[in-house]
């Protein structure tokens, strides 16, 4: 991940389009951030274990792929949320879900699971604060 190489918190990892919410539109940035405030480092500190659990559940990916899954969920939740909630302090939460499955050696689905996912953004700074498996 670029945040391990580029040590400054305002380094931009990604930019996402999102479902327009009234006058709130444009792009949302995922920055490296800090462990205590927002961004990749904040998500890593508080939710890496939860993302890793999902990555490992289906057995198709390694634990190190947790942040790829997280970024895919951020993109999906922002583009096609199932629900959007406004919070105090210029925040919004975009809720969605993630489906995963396990397959046997013949490629047949033997188990399926659905996780709720949430992405909290700052509406005034247009950046990702956090993203986690769960509800808003």
Image (cartoon, helix red, strand yellow):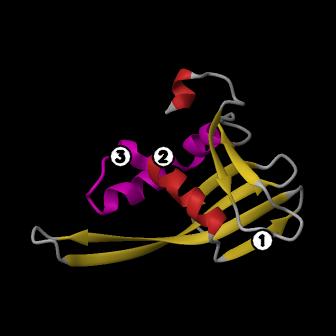
In the image, is residue 80 part of the stretch drawn in magenta? Answer: no
Give the Cα distance between marks 2 and 3. Answer: 9 Å
Answer with the quarter of the image where residue 31 lies. Answer: top right
The numbered mark, 2 or 1, whose residue comes first in the sequence reads 2
Q: Which residue bears the numbered disc 3? A: 63
> Most extreme residue toward the left, as rendered?
106
Identify the disc placed on residue 100: none
**Residue 97 in picture, x, y percent from top left:** 53, 72
Q: Main secondary structure of the magenta part?
A: helix
Horizontal side, residue 88 vs residue 111: left or right: right
In the image, is residue 54 part of the stretch drawn in magenta? Answer: yes
Q: Are marks 3 and 1 in contact (CB under 8 Å)?
A: no
**Residue 111 in picture, x, y percent from top left:** 27, 77
Is residue 128 something that shows in the picture? no
Identify the disc placed on residue 85: 1
Secondary structure, mark 3, is helix
Give the Cα distance between marks 2 and 1. Answer: 24 Å
Q: Which residue bears the numbered disc 2? A: 67
* Residue in the picture at 75% in, 55% down: 121
Q: Which residues are magenta?
A: 39-67
Q: Are marks 2 and 3 in contact (CB under 8 Å)?
A: no
* Residue in the picture at 61% in, 65% down: 77
Horizontal side, residue 41 vs residue 36: left or right: left
């Amino acid at each position: 991940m670029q945040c391990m190489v580029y040590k400054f918190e305002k380094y931009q990892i990604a930019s996402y389009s999102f479902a327009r919410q009234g006058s709130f539109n444009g792009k949302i940035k995922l920055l490296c951030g800090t462990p205590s405030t927002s961004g990749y480092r904040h998500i890593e500190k508080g939710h890496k274990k939860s993302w890793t659990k999902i990555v490992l559940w289906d057995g198709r990916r390694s634990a190190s792929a947790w942040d790829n899954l997280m970024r895919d969920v951020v993109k999906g939740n922002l583009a096609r949320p199932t629900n959007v909630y406004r919070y105090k302090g210029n925040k919004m939460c975009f809720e969605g879900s993630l489906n995963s499955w396990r397959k046997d050696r013949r490629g047949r689905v033997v188990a399926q699971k659905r996780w709720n996912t949430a992405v909290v953004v700052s509406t005034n700074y247009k950046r990702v604060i956090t993203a986690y498996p769960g509800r808003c």
